[in-house]
């Protein structure tokens, strides 16, 4: 039986998630693939196999080398290679390397390189308690700001038309607008879009960017649940084999270089993005791993979230309403209060202390979504604890008075326009 047929048979027996995973890890385009034979043929092409070999972790390299020497003792390592379709697993549980994989491996992994790899020791954590506390405080702040920024992105995307540029890209004007709104640079905005897409918060449809399948869940979730979604996304991109090798490290960037010693070209670009995303998510600060990064990599998400929560800014029910129609939240608001407030205000600056602005258009939008004048006043009074400034009071009353003056109703004879 040819290797193409063997690989196609193995692919047919794999789950959809396994297929998505191997295509993602092997960094392969799929627009020309129609069936399992097409995918199998693509998987064993020399250039694709060579790319997969350069993306192997240190443990996988040693496991593959041992297999070539008839040593199958590392079952977990060999199983991970089988899921990459570099090794075939037979019905009796034995493993056999693909010829293309063997050829590429011998070209890339010399005996000298293998000896150095087997004798090298992975660096472990060395930070003092004070250093780790500083890393955690900075990483916790990054995590919070990213959660806020992603919320801002999906809300903006629901209300504005953002078209696709090129092949799955966001236009520079849109990136600049988002970056200006968040007070960050364009590269931050571009990375934010990438993280949102990977986490199914946004997606592409009909040549435009739209909110994704996780949008509604995101809006109603707590900050820690939101963080767990994006953190799990990052872990899935790393892959389960690499996570155990990275968990004991101190500097994530150095650890990636040690874990993927053959990385180059597309794999190196993928790893570079993973390092950047780790900073964005708050898993690292200046490449130094936070105290919740290792538990996450080890599969203990509950412990990771618990450690993160200790370093997130505490929520509070407090805003300051100013006569110039600006509203300042001196700290993070509870999720339900923030969402209710944002129904009738516009954001000016999002962060630990956020600034909003109330105007005629924003109040009208709130009324259109079902809020009443009394509900708007009640929330502002509750959060501020004082009477509304006269300009704000007048603005809300004026907007409510104007709202609904023109009403369109359906009648048996057509549309009826009524005005008070």
Image (cartoon, rainbow, N blue to C red):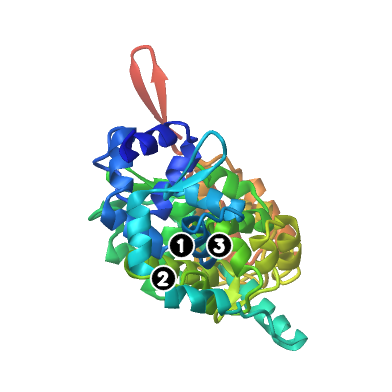
390 or 5: nearer the viewer: 5
Other residues around mark 3 within 10 Å, as few (<14) / some (14–19) / many (≥20): many
Residue 192 quadrant: bottom left
Measured from the top left, where is residue 276 in percent x and y? 47, 71
Q: Residue furthest front?
A: 70
Q: Which mark is residue 262?
A: 2
Q: Which residue is depicted at the point 52% across and 60% down?
A: 66
The number of discs equals 3
Q: Is residue 403 visible?
A: yes
Q: Secondary structure at mark 2?
A: loop
- Relative horizontal placement of residue 46, taking residue 117 as reference (left or right): left
What residue does disc 1 label? 56
Q: Is residue 159 visible?
A: no
Of 395 and 222, nearer the camera is 222
Query: CA–CA distance between discs 1 and 2?
Result: 7 Å
Q: Which residue is mark 3?
A: 242
Label 3 secondary element: helix
Front residue of this view, candidates 138 and 76: 76
Crowd band around label 1 with a 10 angstrom C-alpha radius: few (<14), some (14–19), many (20+): many
- C-alpha distance separating marks 3 and 1: 9 Å
The answer to whether mark 1 and mark 2 are in CB contact below 8 A is: yes
Percent x, y of residue 41: 28, 42
For label 2, the crowd category at 10 Å Cα-Cα, with few meaning under 14, some 14 to 19 and many 20 or more, is many
Which one is earlier in the sequence, the residue at label 2 or at label 3? 3
Secondary structure state at the residue bearing disc 1: loop
Question: Eyeballing the image, is 278 above or below 69?
Answer: below
Question: Which residue is nearer to you in this view: 318 or 149?
Answer: 149
Q: Which mark is residue 319?
A: none
């Amino acid at each position: 039986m040819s290797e193409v047929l063997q690989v196609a048979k193995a692919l047919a027996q794999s789950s959809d998630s396994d297929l998505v995973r191997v295509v993602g890890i092997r960094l392969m385009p799929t627009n020309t693939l129609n069936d399992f034979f097409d995918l199998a043929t693509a998987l064993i092409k020399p250039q694709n196999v060579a790319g997969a070999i350069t993306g192997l972790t240190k443990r996988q390299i040693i496991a593959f080398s041992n297999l070539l020497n008839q040593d199958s003792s590392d079952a977990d390592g060999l199983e991970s290679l089988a899921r990459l379709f570099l090794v075939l697993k037979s019905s009796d549980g034995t493993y056999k390397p693909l010829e293309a994989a063997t050829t590429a491996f011998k070209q890339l992994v010399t005996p000298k390189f293998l000896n150095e790899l087997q004798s090298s020791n992975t660096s472990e954590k060395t930070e003092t308690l004070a250093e780790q506390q500083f890393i955690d405080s900075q990483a916790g702040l990054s995590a919070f700001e990213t959660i806020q920024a992603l919320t801002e992105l999906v809300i903006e995307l629901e209300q504005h038309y953002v078209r696709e540029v090129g092949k799955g890209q966001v236009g520079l004007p849109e990136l600049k607008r988002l970056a200006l709104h968040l007070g960050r640079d364009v590269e931050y905005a571009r990375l934010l879009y990438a993280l949102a897409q990977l986490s199914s918060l946004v997606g592409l449809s009909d040549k435009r960017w739209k909110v994704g399948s996780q949008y509604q869940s995101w809006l109603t979730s707590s900050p820690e649940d939101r963080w767990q979604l994006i953190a799990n996304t990052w872990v899935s991109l790393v892959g389960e084999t690499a996570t155990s090798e990275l968990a004991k490290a101190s500097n994530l960037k150095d650890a990636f270089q040690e874990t993927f010693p053959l990385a180059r070209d597309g794999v190196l670009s993928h790893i570079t993005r993973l390092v950047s995303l780790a900073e964005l998510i708050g898993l690292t600060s200046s490449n130094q791993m936070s105290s919740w990064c290792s538990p996450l990599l080890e599969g203990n998400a509950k412990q990771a979230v618990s450690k993160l929560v200790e370093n997130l800014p505490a929520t509070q029910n407090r805003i300051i309403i100013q006569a110039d129609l600006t509203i300042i939240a001196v700290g993070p608001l509870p999720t339900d209060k923030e969402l209710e407030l944002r129904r009738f205000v516009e954001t000016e600056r999002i962060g630990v202390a956020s600034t909003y602005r109330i105007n005629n258009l924003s109040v009208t939008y709130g009324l259109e979504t079902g809020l009443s004048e009394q509900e708007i006043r009640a929330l502002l009074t509750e959060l501020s604890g004082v009477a509304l400034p006269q300009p704000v009071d007048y603005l809300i009353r004026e907007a409510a008075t104007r709202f609904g003056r023109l009403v369109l109703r359906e009648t048996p004879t057509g549309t009826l326009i009524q005005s008070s």
